[in-house]
């Protein structure tokens, strides 16, 4: 039996000769043999399993590292409106000791929420 790739999935191909008394394998093996019940899980894209994307992906590590909730950091950012994005990042870095990536994520998220 040989295997080839077609459409991004591995499929089994039946050989030309089958010994008498043996069961013939299906022409194409379904991918459910490798990933569980394919028919049921194929379209299951629940929001709980989706990874967090964008600036919010930094929030758990920001809260853990600096010991304050994100709402506090966003309050600090909002208190300094109407400043430009990089000015707000500089304030968080200089006055509160945040790293550039963390400060940028907080500012970007606050500005996006408020549409400033």
Image (tube, rainbow, N blue to C red):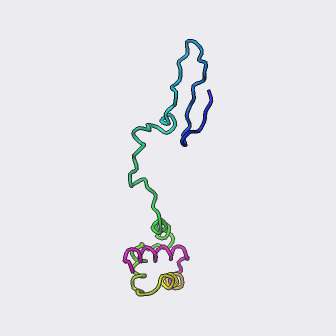
Nearest the viewer among 85 and 98 is 85
Q: In the current view of this chain or complex, which residue is farthest to the left?
A: 114
Location of the N terminus (image quadrant): top right
Q: In the displayed structure, would residue 86 be above or below residue 67? A: below
Residue 70 located within the stretch drawn in magenta: no
Residue 97 located within the stretch drawn in magenta: yes
Point out residue 65 in the picture as x, y percentages from the top left corner.
Answer: 51, 70
User: To which quarter of the image does residue 68 belong?
Assistant: bottom left
Residue at horizontal 55%, vertical 16%? 22
Nearest the viewer among 70 and 51 is 51
Q: Is residue 2 left or right of residue 43?
A: right
Location of the C terminus (image quadrant): bottom left
Q: Is residue 81 left or right of residue 9?
A: left
Q: In the current view of this chain or complex, which residue is farthest to the right?
A: 2
Q: In the displayed structure, would residue 115 be above or below residue 6? A: below
Point out residue 61 in the picture as x, y percentages from the top left corner.
Answer: 50, 67
Q: In the current view of this chain or complex, which residue is farthest to the top?
A: 20
Q: How many marks?
A: 0
Secondary structure mostly seen in magenta is helix
Point out residue 76 in the picture as x, y percentages from the top left corner.
Answer: 42, 82
User: To which quarter of the image does residue 41 belong?
Assistant: top left
Residue at horizontal 48%, vertical 82%? 85
Point out residue 104 in the picture as x, y percentages from the top left corner.
Answer: 50, 76
Residue range of the region highlighted in magenta in the rendering: 95-116
Nearest the viewer among 3 and 55 is 3
Residue at horizontal 53%, vertical 81%? 93
Residue at horizontal 45%, vertical 67%? 56
């Amino acid at each position: 039996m040989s295997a080839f790739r077609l459409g991004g999935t591995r499929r089994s191909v039946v050989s030309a000769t089958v010994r008498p008394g043996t069961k013939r394998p299906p022409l194409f093996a379904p991918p459910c043999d490798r990933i569980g019940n394919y028919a049921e899980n194929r379209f299951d894209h629940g929001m709980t399993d989706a990874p967090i994307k964008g600036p919010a992906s930094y929030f758990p590590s920001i809260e853990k590292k600096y010991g304050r909730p994100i709402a506090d950091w966003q309050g600090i950012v909002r208190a300094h409106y109407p400043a430009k994005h990089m000015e707000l990042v500089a304030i968080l870095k200089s006055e509160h000791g945040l790293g550039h990536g963390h400060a940028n994520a907080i500012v970007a998220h606050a500005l996006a929420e408020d549409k400033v």
